[in-house]
Image (spheres, grey):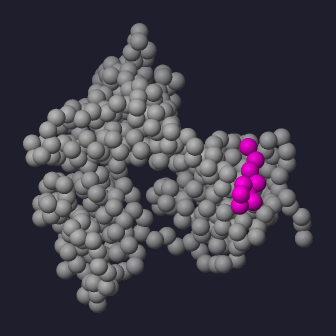
Amino acid sequence: MTNYDYDVMFIGSGHANWHAALALRKAGKKVVLIEKDLIAGTCTNYGCNAKILLDGAADVLHQAAAYQGKGIAGDLKIDWSDLMKYKHQTINPLHLLLEKQFKAAGIEIIDGTAAFVDQHTVEAAGKTISAQDIIIGTGQRPSILPIPGKELMHDSRDFLDLPELPAHMTFIGAGIISLEFAMLVQAAGTQVTIIEFAETALRGFEKKYVEQILQQMRDLGIELHFKEAVQSVEQQDSRLLVKTASGLAVTTDYVVAGTGRIPNVEELNLDKVGVKFDKTGILVDDHLQTNVEHIYASGDVIAKRIPKLTPTATFESNYLAALLAGQTTAPIKYPAVASVVFTLPRIAQVGVTSEQAAAHPDDYQIVTLPYGTVLRFQTKNEPAAEATLVFDQDHYLVGASVYGDEAPELINFLTMVISQKLTQAKLNQAVFAFPSQTIGLLSMLSPYLKQF
């Protein structure tokens, strides 16, 4: 048997990898993490964690506005400088804490960029490192339009580190990142323009809820331009000018590129070992193995239709840990995957969409629950809050969309109902806290569920 330096090598240290690294180390494997950036990856240091922390202040303002004239008087405001200081105090130490945890578990860490030499070997930090199995979890990075002035645009990582907010900000693209950031900075007093090439935003989410969010943005003064192709960004004295093919010209102070993300594969030297990949990521089979034996991929770097989210990457990481520890030989089987857009209010989606259900009326029943109106005392004066649910022929819940401030928590509950195929009888075995939005929605949902 060939002797390798390690049993398992992880390229990248984000959620796609570190869960498996800890589990396999606990199982007795000799493990190494190779990371060219901060330990724990994008989500921890430059993404989800920082985003939701900053969003918290805007969420408070948004919910307080619902009670203006109903018990709350006076204006609240966001001090972006103080908020950013709080972000640094909270987020900056995380990679150090996780690095300490990994080392304490006996995981070796190498700082450097990994490039394949052969199917079991990479070069990193000036040395050659080998392993029996290699897992690639290098994630994605923002995609910047290849147009004149692209160097004047900023990505999400830049945005989440802004010390002060500009007077006007323009977002190129109307995806999740742009809409979330736009509502955040608008709440902090910045004027916002969004320019999108497509006809609308957020494909894959409930259309009526997307339209409600877009109208909410317009009502707040955010300018939305659809079916516009950005052609250039120009410096004009101290400001910037964004031009589109139709002749639209927007004068702004800061431009954020929100036109998608691309997989981090270029530096890996995949061609050297014949690992197949395309523009959407590394190709894997139903065991997350590439076309090369002993080389796997996990997380956002995979070419897949399953949503590229942190929880999905964690699920894949845990699966690979079980696979390489010999605890399973079964192919990966994804459960229902919940997605949330952290706009104000939120939109959440899991499972079969109402659009998919409407295309197969004999197979599904669509039910709309206006819980914001019915449960107004429980929803913090949010009458527009609503859920659209999809049931199959056996009356199991198979899909849900939620519009409302508590959509992330409610979609988690509904995801459990879907994944566990819960019936009325099973739900009746639990006693939930009252009054709460969860128990309120449950009371409205239960009559449509399978009884036993």
User: Which residue: 31% across, 33% down?
Assistant: 78
Residue 443 in the image, given as x and y percentages of width and height? 20, 75
- Left or right relative to 397: residue 39: right
Q: Which quarter of the image is occupied by the C terminus?
A: bottom left
User: Which residue: 52% across, 43% down?
Assistant: 91
- Left or right relative to 435: residue 173: right
Q: Point out the stretch of residues depicted in magenta.
A: 103-111
Residue 163 visible in rendering: yes
- Left or right relative to 132: residue 221: left
Residue 185 in the image, given as x and y percentages of width and height? 33, 34
Q: Which quarter of the image is occupied by the N terminus?
A: bottom right
User: Which residue: 72% across, 65% down?
Assistant: 25
The front one of 202 and 169 is 169
Residue 42, located in which quarter of the rendered image? top right
Give the answer, above or below, for where 220 lies relative to 67.
Answer: above
The front one of 382 and 193 is 382
* Total tally of numbered discs in the picture: 0
Q: Residue furthest bottom?
A: 452
Give the answer, above or below, for where 379 lies relative to 184.
Answer: below
User: Which residue: 36% across, 43% down?
Assistant: 55
Residue 166, located in which quarter of the rendered image? top left
